[in-house]
Amino acid sequence: MQIKINGSEVPVKENETILEVAERLGYDIPTLCYDPDLPPQGSCRMCVCEVNGKMTTACNTKVSEGMDVLTDSERVIKSRRLNAELLLSKHKLDDNVHLKNDLLKIKEKYGLDKPRFPVQESYVYDDSSSAIVRDNSKCILCGKCVNKCQETQGVAAICFVGRGVDMHVSPAFNKHLADTFCVNCGQCSLVCPTGAIKEVDSIKDVKAAIDDPKKIVVVQTAPAVRASIGEEFGLPPGSLVTKKLVSGLRRLGFDKVFDTDFTADLTIMEEGTELISRVKNKGTLPLVTSCSPGWIKFCEHFFPECLSNLSTCKSPQQMFGALAKTFYAEKIGADPKNMVVVSIMPCTAKKFECKREEMNSSGFQDVDYVLTTRELARFMKQEKINLSKLYEDEYDDPLGESTGAGVIFGATGGVMEAALRTAYEIITGKTLGKLEFMETRGLPGIKTGSVGLNGLTLNFAVASGLSNARKLMEEVKAGTSKYHFIEIMCCPGGCLAGGGQPIPTNDKVRLKRMQAIYQEDKNMTIRKSHENPSVIKIYEEFLEKPNSHKAHELLHTSYVDRSEEC
């Protein structure tokens, strides 16, 4: 099939949209409401084109034989300018610090220095959540956040409220976000084109702690950050900047730079032992992973009857905080009340997690502050640090040593693969002939497989994105699940696509980051959690053994039935 675009005949594929064809050919068509992960809406009207003399939106119009498309005719430009001016009348531009404001780019593209329509002044600013801020003065009603929350995540914490000029995005009944079943995943902030939804900013608090001479400030870096933060400094998606990241954090003034991958390895030891115990002793199955705080809150709200299926293990972030203020503080002779633990995470839900009442087994709040990948990039830029130009440096010991199994936690299926590497060898007493479990890899929302372990067939499933998680959990709730072990990650693609990651995050970007994660795994000298020398040593010196009484006190937790909260 062929169509004509801007006077040129071009071949097209069946079911392609005009926007997809234009992007493939390099024509620039602005969009605000379009998200490749969601069904196209055509609500912002910024992608209008002239098709056979009629105006139509490019994002949701399929190509057909005989089409004659103009992407930049005089009528098209006039229509886009008018649409942009109307959107700008709903958007307060002052003090906007969102680095990826697509509406501002359109304003500059079409020279709209003095929009004709007055800006509305009545808005809601909701900072009730510990993770997410909503500023309706910047909202243009594109609907991407609503669709992401409802379609991708199946949560529906926000929706359109009111009609006509009174329409706005809000939780139902205009509740505060903190009073809803929002899981703090931040996928809404990842797709917002104007910064109307963004993460709670903790940069000032972290900087104040670093500048306080009485404080010992240590930082941990999540697996996914090393494969994504380079994008904020002009590097292509999937650029591994692990050692430059360490260098940048030292430049910011952190006293010690550690790796969350260390406690990811520790998680495998604890969770793997828990799985083996449940299988042998006929405990509650399937065992479901507990690394993702957005998923945990989702389960607490929507599947409280399945809380006993959750692993009691804390997430690697929280394990690290507990050990930093006990084991490490003791090792260096520091008073834990003077220690500040900062996490660099791809996830906004980690901000909520660190403030949970259960997360104080050190006697203090185990993790004090969380900076998202985007926040850390802003922090570095404020301090005139260009990550891409930095020298490479190494993590500090002993909480900086990790394995390939720890780093793949950043990708959907990574926790499952890391667990299988260790569980196989512990249960069978045999050395794995291969380290890659390909059934766990890739972007499909649900992946399944099985592995033989000394006569036992272990059935497993992996889900990412909460709509997919819901499908698996409905089976668990009904008692029909055939799986022994389930990994769930809140965000589509796993942590590498978390709500605090660089924008844009789409399937092409997810795949690049995923490839980087697995490349980092291959680059590691040790690729199995139970072979991490520092993990072995911490059990010998401090924790005794996996699932010991002390390990349970520091590394395990309990959950809350939140079904009646909203």
Image (cartoon, rainbow, N blue to C red):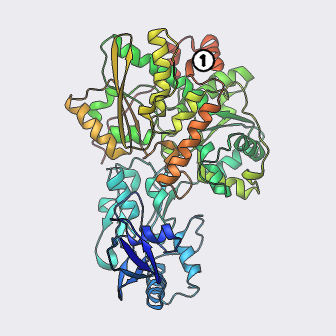
**Whether residue 440 is situated above or below residue 378 in the rendered picture:** above
Quarter holding residue 441: top left
Q: Residue at x 36, y 89 (%)?
A: 53
Quarter holding residue 146: bottom left
The image shows residue 378 at horizontal and vertical percentages of 66, 56
Q: Nearer the viewer, residue 308 or 143?
A: 143
| Residue holding disc 1 | 531
Can residue 347 be seen by looking at this rendering?
no
The image shows residue 344 at horizontal and vertical percentages of 61, 43
Q: Nearer the viewer, residue 26 or 360?
A: 26
- Element at badge 1? helix
Tell me the amino acid under the disc marked 1: Glu
In the image, is 155 to the left or to the right of 20? left
Structural crowding at the residue carrying mark 1, measured as other residues with C-alpha within 10 Å and reported as few (<14), some (14–19) or many (≥20): some
Q: Residue at x 28, y 74 (%)?
A: 163
Tally of numbered tags: 1
Quarter holding residue 122: bottom left
The image shows residue 84 at horizontal and vertical percentages of 47, 81
In the image, is 501 to the left or to the right of 217? left
Can residue 248 be seen by looking at this rendering?
yes
Q: Residue at x 71, y 57 (%)?
A: 381
Outermost top residue: 429
Q: Quadrant of the N terminus?
A: bottom left
